[in-house]
């Protein structure tokens, strides 16, 4: 029996948890009778300073009064208690304590003591508060943020992500990012993403994602692995930015740089680049031809009917050009009422047929205000060793020959 008592005493005094035993004397404030080293270390008081004193001395301004009221009720009624509150050490510093109190009765059932097992959970509470703060900060961020586990299941999505994707957070968490795939990016793109993440590397790219309503948006996203203390990947965090407006603007700028505003055909600057490229690509097996087209008597149209009517005639002729050529060909508004058509991989007989089709369709078109207009066309096949400017000059000379010959004609430039 003595050895068992010694074992119990050693267990209490050497326990890692703070343990304190008080008398069940309510009038005396439940004075301390025994406190182990862990309790003394936690509170900053020695056993001599605690003996016979009430543990009220650990309470302070930020101790939760509701918790203390519940504690007192349990002590009065001899019931088990469990709670968490802020206590104060001897030096006045605060700590967060989690403790339970068990009533002790003698053989006759009389309440004689209370034994309390306590833990300083300040670090844990601080970490939990930091985690909650971080979660609030991530949720308040203006950029969309996702966090997934290693199985790609989403464990966190902030409000910004919910807003841009159209999904409520409750529908996102637990799913995988495949939910947002638009089908606009192929398997090779996602294979590269997978390889980067599995090798612990960041992956940055512009994603074309799908919203809940099926509409698409462009997101510039950076995905990074998160590792634990041992360097093992535990999660992935994705920070994005909706760049749909920027993509639209950049597309508009690209269009403006290559497209004629009135007709939607290529503009002259882009057309000159296409002509240079065609000359570089040209082979004996893959000839190309150049057609220069000009609306006949266009100045008279402008003078008589005004510039709005003239613009409409230009638009109509541009539409005829687009409808008359092949998908591999390029129609260019060269300037004013003049157009250039680049006929790719096109022998002379096919080029002449296309040019005649354009001439005939322009002639057959009737504008409600202006009536009929015609066009003259010059055609030149690129010769080996000929520069872009040289083939254009030959087609242009053929055009003027067509005009001198009575207009509404197609003239083929002599071969070099």
Image (tube, rainbow, N blue to C red):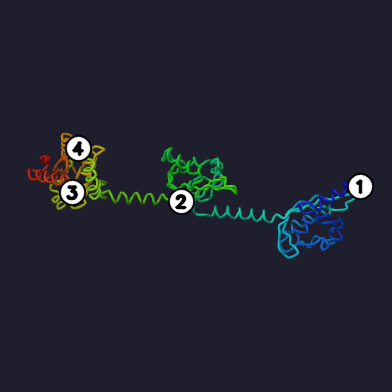
Front-most of 350 and 201? 201
Look at the numbered discs 1 and 3 and tell me whether their residues touch, using CB distance below 8 Å. Answer: no
**Mark 3 = which residue?**
337
Q: Residues within 10 Å of mark 2 (few under 14, many from 20)?
A: some
**Mark 1 = which residue?**
107
Apparent side of residue 195 relative to residue 352 in the rendered image (left or right): right
Q: How far apart are marks 1 and 3 (CA)?
A: 115 Å
Query: Which mark is first along the chain, 2 or 4?
Result: 2
**Mark 2 = which residue?**
241
Q: How crowded is mark 3: few (under 14 residues within 10 Å), some or many (20 or more)?
A: many
Query: Which mark is first along the chain, 4 or 1?
Result: 1
Q: Please give the name of the residue rendered at 47% of the width and 46% of the height, measured from the top-left corner.
A: 203
Most extreme residue toward the bottom is 91
Query: Which mark is first along the chain, 3 or 1?
Result: 1
Look at the numbered discs 1 and 4 and tell me whether their residues touch, using CB distance below 8 Å. Answer: no
Q: How far apart are marks 3 and 2 (CA)?
A: 45 Å
In the rendering, at what x and y percent does residue 309 appear? Answer: 20, 49
SS class, disc 1? loop
Instruction: Reply above or below: 6 against 184.
Output: below
Mark whose residue sits in front, 4 or 3: 4
> Which numbered marker is on residue 19?
none
Query: Which mark is first along the chain, 2 or 3?
Result: 2
Q: Distance between the residues labelled 4 and 3?
A: 27 Å
SS class, disc 2? strand
In the rendering, at what x and y percent does residue 301 appear? Answer: 15, 49
Most extreme residue toward the left is 405
């Amino acid at each position: 029996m003595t050895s068992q008592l010694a074992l119990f005493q050693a267990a209490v005094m050497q326990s890692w948890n703070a343990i304190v035993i008080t008398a069940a004397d309510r009038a005396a404030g439940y004075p301390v009778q025994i406190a182990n080293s862990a309790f003394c270390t936690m509170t900053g008081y020695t056993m001599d300073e605690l003996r016979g004193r009430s543990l009220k001395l650990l309470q302070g301004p930020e101790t939760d009064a509701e918790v203390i009221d519940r504690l007192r009720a349990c002590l009065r009624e001899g019931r088990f208690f469990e709670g968490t509150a802020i206590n104060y050490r001897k030096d006045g510093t605060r700590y967060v304590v989690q403790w339970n109190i068990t009533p002790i009765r003698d053989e006759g059932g009389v309440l004689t003591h209370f034994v309390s097992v306590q833990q300083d959970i300040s670090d844990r509470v601080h970490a939990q508060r930091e985690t909650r703060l971080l979660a609030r900060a991530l949720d308040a961020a203006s950029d969309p943020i996702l966090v997934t586990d290693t199985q790609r299941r989403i464990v966190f999505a902030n409000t910004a992500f919910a807003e841009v994707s159209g999904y409520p957070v409750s529908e996102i968490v637990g799913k995988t990012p495949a939910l947002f795939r638009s089908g606009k990016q192929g398997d090779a793109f996602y294979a590269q993403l997978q390889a980067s993440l599995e090798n612990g590397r960041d992956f940055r790219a512009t994603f074309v994602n799908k919203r809940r309503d099926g509409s698409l948006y462009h997101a510039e996203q950076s995905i990074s692995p998160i590792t634990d203390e041992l360097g093992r990947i535990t999660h992935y965090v994705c920070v994005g930015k909706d760049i749909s407006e920027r993509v639209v603007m950049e597309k508009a700028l690209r269009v403006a740089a290559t497209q004629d505003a009135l007709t939607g055909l290529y503009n002259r600057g882009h057309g000159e680049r296409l002509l240079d490229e065609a000359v570089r690509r040209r082979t004996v097996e893959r000839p190309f031809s150049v057609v220069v087209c000009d609306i006949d008597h266009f100045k008279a149209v402008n003078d008589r009917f005004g510039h709005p009517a003239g613009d409409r005639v230009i638009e109509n002729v541009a539409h005829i050009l687009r409808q008359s050529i092949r998908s591999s060909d390029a129609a260019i508004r060269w300037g004013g009422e003049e157009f250039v058509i680049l006929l790719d991989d096109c022998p002379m007989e096919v080029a002449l047929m296309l040019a005649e089709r354009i001439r005939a369709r322009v002639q057959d078109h009737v504008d409600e205000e202006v009536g009929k207009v015609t066009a003259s066309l010059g055609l030149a096949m690129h010769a080996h060793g000929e520069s872009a400017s040289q083939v254009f000059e030959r087609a242009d000379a053929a055009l003027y020959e067509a005009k001198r010959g009575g207009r509404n004609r197609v003239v083929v430039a002599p071969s070099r």
